[in-house]
């Protein structure tokens, strides 16, 4: 018999909130993790994104809150996840008035410091910014009673191990309850748990099949400013029934849904600015096929039952590999086949490669439908609709008009041609923009590297930087991308060519992001080495 949230020992205030959010019963990871966490035990949890682990570690923490000071610290690998978890804490704690603050790089220190000084009970932060605020004496974690390491494997991949250990050492281990959640348990994670956790109870849930055998996975390379045009072409030619499109932000979801509606597609978005009743109404329309396209963020799609999805489209490629698996797992269910499509910009090759490594196989690159293919598809759909009308005509109510037209001297062919012309005029005239062809995304970085001199980027709008860490430190391109993207709060996809040499590394950063990258990457360790980052020409002059 499946346990209920009431069976887990949660407080009435939390149960009422869960009911209002539409949570019917706990997921496996929640059923396993919540009782021991409520009892004060450390928990080591193995679960993928999308299994309900955020509620698993958040609800026990909320139940034990009191009104005084910072008591809960949750560390996440990225800005996006910090915001998502903070929003979840706010939702789950709405009935008890929880005060929560997300902290991450790229946002003003002053704003975060003002909020901290006003007093918060829960902080959700990235390791780098959290440690910065601790060093500034603005964040006191000494009395934290409940500490969570979320997506621990991703944090370690991004080089945060030193920051995490420094933060853990700053807290009072004798008073701290610790939970660690990760998709995988590496030797490093086990050592971390052994060193900083007290007899943790290990809980786990079965992994989703990472290969998604019933899902046809493919990607298309397209420039950022032409993604709408590319998506429109795909929607026209695919045999899609119910399509779920993922965007990175709620603003992006709302704007994309509006754009698709203007193009004549029956689309709507679900995002955090909608009430629960509005979200349920939209999902209901999707189930009934009144809508065939639903645009959503990862957070809003979780916990929502969306059946019979034929296509999942990653309009924005996910930043975390686990998220990709969770997204495409929405299709290809119950023995049916499904399609997963990802739009990839030329500079997002590294994200795509990490996803391929995670699922254990390459994703097929496909070519976008050309103009002729789209026009042929439109003609085929028009013809099918016309044949359907002819096949269902039985009442004879229009025969007097037809006889009249024939009596006026028009042939049957002329009458049919006139009707077809009239029907064509009633069709939605969707734009069919030209799309620039993109060279293989797998070749672009190497091409840029060949064109770039050591001390200056020849790619327009890019600035070449140099850091004092290289192959001798075990540095990988993924380390560079993740560290800079998370610490400086810029999209990893905007980072250009990366040239890792023995003792140093050169990388291209858009001119618009250089100042913030140089500022945020001060006093940052990567692969155990204190990073020194500067413009490549300045580093050369300093030698």
Image (spheres, rainbow, N blue to C red):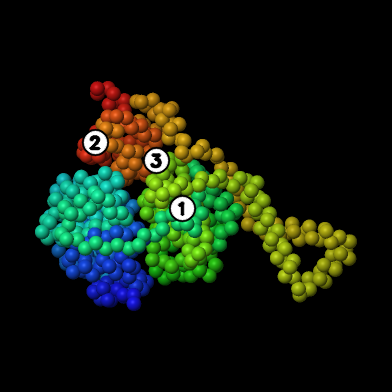
185 in relation to 14, above or below = above
Q: Quadrant of residue 41?
A: bottom left
Q: Position of residue 463 (x, y in %)?
A: 36, 31
SS at badge 2: loop
Picture residue at 29% right of the left edge, 62% below the top: 204
Direction from residue 486 to residue 262 in the image, left or right: right
Q: Earlier in the sequence, mark 3 or mark 2?
A: 3
The 10 Å Cα crowd at callout 2, few under 14, some 14 to 19, many 20 or more, is some
Residue 448, percent from left and from top: 43, 31
In percent of the image, x 68 and y 62: which residue is there? 385
| Camera-side residue of 107 and 162 | 162
C-alpha separation, residue under disc 3 versus residue under disc 2: 20 Å
User: Where residue 485 sits in the image (x, y, percent)?
Assistant: 33, 43
Q: Is residue 76 left or right of residue 397?
A: left
Q: Earlier in the sequence, mark 3 or mark 1?
A: 1
Q: Secondary structure at mark 3?
A: helix
Which mark's residue is nearer the viewer, 3 or 2? 2
Q: State the residue position of label 3.
A: 494
Query: Which element is circle 1 on?
Result: strand
Q: Is residue 243 visible?
A: no
Instruction: Specify whether 117 is left or right of 54.
Output: left
Mark 2 sits on what residue?
A: 531
What label sits on residue 540 in the rendered view? none
Query: 327 and 2: which one is in front?
Result: 2
The answer for how far apart the CA atoms under marks 1 and 2 are is 34 Å
What's the mark number on residue 314? Answer: 1
């Amino acid at each position: 018999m499946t346990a209920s949230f009431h069976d887990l020992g949660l407080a009435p205030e939390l149960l009422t909130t869960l009911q209002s959010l539409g949570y019917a019963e706990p997921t496996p990871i929640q059923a396993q993790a919540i009782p021991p966490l409520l009892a004060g035990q450390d928990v080591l949890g193995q679960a993928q994104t999308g299994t309900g682990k955020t509620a698993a570690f958040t609800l026990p923490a909320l139940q034990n809150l009191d009104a005084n000071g910072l008591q809960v610290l949750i560390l996440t690998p990225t800005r996006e996840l910090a915001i998502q978890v903070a929003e979840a804490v706010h939702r789950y704690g709405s009935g008890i008035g929880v005060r929560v603050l997300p902290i991450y790089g790229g946002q003003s220190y002053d704003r975060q410091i003002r909020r901290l000084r006003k007093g918060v009970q829960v902080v959700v932060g990235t390791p780098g910014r959290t440690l910065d605020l601790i060093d500034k004496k603005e964040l006191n974690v000494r009395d934290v009673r409940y500490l969570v390491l979320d997506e621990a494997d991703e944090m370690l991949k991004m080089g945060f191990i030193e920051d995490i250990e420094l933060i853990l050492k700053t807290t009072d281990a004798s008073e701290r309850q610790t939970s660690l959640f990760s998709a995988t348990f590496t030797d490093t994670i086990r050592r971390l748990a052994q060193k900083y956790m007290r007899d943790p109870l290990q809980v786990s849930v079965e992994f989703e099949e990472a290969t998604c055998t019933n899902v046809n996975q493919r990607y298309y390379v397209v420039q950022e400013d032409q993604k709408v045009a590319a998506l429109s072409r795909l929607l026209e030619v695919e045999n899609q029934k119910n399509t779920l499109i993922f965007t990175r932000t709620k603003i992006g979801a709302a704007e994309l849904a509006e754009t698709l509606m203007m193009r004549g597609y029956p689309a709507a978005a679900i995002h955090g600015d909608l009430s629960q009743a509005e979200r349920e109404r939209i999902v209901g329309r999707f189930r009934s096929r009144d809508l065939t396209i639903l645009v959503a963020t990862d957070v809003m799609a979780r916990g929502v039952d969306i059946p019979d999805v034929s296509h999942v489209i990653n309009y924005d490629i996910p930043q975390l590999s686990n998220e990709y698996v969770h997204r495409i797992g929405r299709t290809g269910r119950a023995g049916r086949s499904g399609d997963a499509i990802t739009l990839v910009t030329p500079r997002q090759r590294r994200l795509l490669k990490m996803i391929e490594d995670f699922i254990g196989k390459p994703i097929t690159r496909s070519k976008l439908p050309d103009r002729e293919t789209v026009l042929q598809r439109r003609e085929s759909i028009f013809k099918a609709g016309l044949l359907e009308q002819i096949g269902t005509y039985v009442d004879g109510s229009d025969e007097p008009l037809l006889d009249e037209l024939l009596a006026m001297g028009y042939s049957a062919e002329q009458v049919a041609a006139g009707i077809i012309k009239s029907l064509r005029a009633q069709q939605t005239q969707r734009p069919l923009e030209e799309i620039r062809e993109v060279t293989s995304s797998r070749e672009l970085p190497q091409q840029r590297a060949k064109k770039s001199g050591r001390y200056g980027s020849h790619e327009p709008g890019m600035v070449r930087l140099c850091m004092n860490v290289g192959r001798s430190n075990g540095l990988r391109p993924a380390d560079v991308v993740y560290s800079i993207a998370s610490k400086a709060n810029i999209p990893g996809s905007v980072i250009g060519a990366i040239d890792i040499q023995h003792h140093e590394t050169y990388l291209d950063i858009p001119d618009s992001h250089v100042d913030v990258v140089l500022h945020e990457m001060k006093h940052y360790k990567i692969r155990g080495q204190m990073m020194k980052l500067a413009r490549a020409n300045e580093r050369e002059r300093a030698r």
